[in-house]
Amino acid sequence: MSAAIDKLTIVFGVLARDCKASLLRNMARVEEIGRAFRDYHVVVYENDSKDGTTEVLKEWAAQNDHVVAICETTNKTTIPKKNGRTPYPLKSVYRIEKMVRFRNRVLDEVRSRFEPDLFCFIDIDVESFQAAGVIDAISQAPQDWGALFASGHYLFRKADGTDKVPLFQYDSYAFVPEGVDPMKLGKWVVAHNYNDVISWYSDRLIEECDYVPCRSAFNGIGVYRWEAIRDLNFGIMQTPELKSLSACFCEHVPFNGEIIRKGYRLYATKKIEVTYYHKRLTLIRRFNHWKKIIKVRALIALGKHPYDWVIL
């Protein structure tokens, strides 16, 4: 982007539900990023919280006139129960339809109120992210960028109190490498070792350079040129194989594809580092972590493309 950050405006889109603790940690980080711009606003959509999230959001909006809080009661669960009709709850059409509606609700609110230079979706329920990294990523991004996405991990907390970063990206569901057509992936996104393979592969790519071209990604933070998404909406995307399982791609996959069709490129960047949560590094978790690494390294030794490693 040719203009300096302090000459631009940005709007943050936030989804929130039962995330009071992380909301209290991350509100200040959102504001810190916003203050680096000429002006900023935050549009938050919240539904059905029972832990005090609604009250925190209303107070935030009352104290900061940059914040718009939309709170609703739908009395509906976001994640369905696993059963014969919904064998993959987290990747089910039922769940993703909800995410599509929530994200589009935010976009509609932004269109009705603002005309920013940039838009940023943030999953406010993550443990942490660094405001400086987001600002740096935008400032130094390639000229052809349409969207920038985070590098995200959960962390192992060792006995001595230090952290160990697993060699796997957290959000493999939203990630598609550049040059891969999602509609040719059949039912791979619900395959039993898909997450291990693609989260390892994407982590290796992202660690190799500052900006990795991709077909899709997210990992908790996505920064978009507003001109690239002004007229776009999130939607459902399925292969015939996924449709038969009542499953679908992550809502970011079709949305990001529309940005590419407009002539922009998408990049995942390690400059934006998101921490999802901490796990205590027990012996069994250490063993399982290394078991996954050994398994994936063995597949890499075969010299195949990562999608050839997925076992259906």
Image (spheres, rainbow, N blue to C red):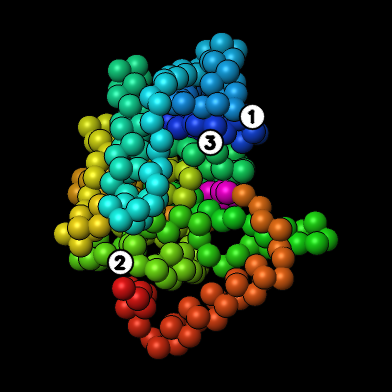
Mark 2: secondary structure: helix
Q: Is residue 281 left or right of residue 252?
A: right
Q: From what the image shows, is residue 292 above or below residue 230?
A: below
Q: Position of residue 227 (x, y in %)?
A: 28, 34
Q: Residue at x 31, y 32 (%)?
A: 101
Query: In the rendered structure, are the residues bearing label 3 and label 2 in contact, judged by CB atoms less than 8 Å apart?
Result: no
Q: Residue furthest right?
A: 160
Q: Is residue 8 visible?
A: no
Q: Residue at x 62, y 43 (%)?
A: 128
Q: Residue at x 48, y 85 (%)?
A: 298
Please give the range of residues in magenta.
Answer: 271-276
* Mark drawn on residue 255: none
Mark 3: secondary structure: loop
Quadrant location, the N terminus: top left
How packed mark 2 is, by other alpha carbons closer than 10 Å (few <14, some 14-19, many 20 or more), is some
Quick check: is 135 in the magenta stretch? no
Which amino acid lies under the numbered mark 1 shown in the image of this protein?
Answer: Leu
* Mark drawn on residue 24: 1
| Cα distance between the residues tagged 1 and 3 | 9 Å
Which amino acid lies under the numbered mark 2 shown in the image of this protein?
Answer: Trp
Q: Is residue 16 left or right of residue 303?
A: right
Q: Which image quadrant for residue 287? A: bottom right
Task: Say which label, 1 or 2, has the lower sequence index.
Answer: 1
Task: Say which label, 1 or 3, has the lower sequence index.
Answer: 1
Mark 1: secondary structure: helix
Residue with the mark numbered 2: 188
The total of numbered circles placed on residues is 3
Q: From what the image shows, is residue 218 above or below residue 114?
A: below
In depth, the one of 131 and 108 nearer the eye is: 108
* Mark drawn on residue 124: 3
Which amino acid lies under the numbered mark 3 shown in the image of this protein?
Answer: Ile
Q: Position of residue 76 (x, y in %)?
A: 38, 31
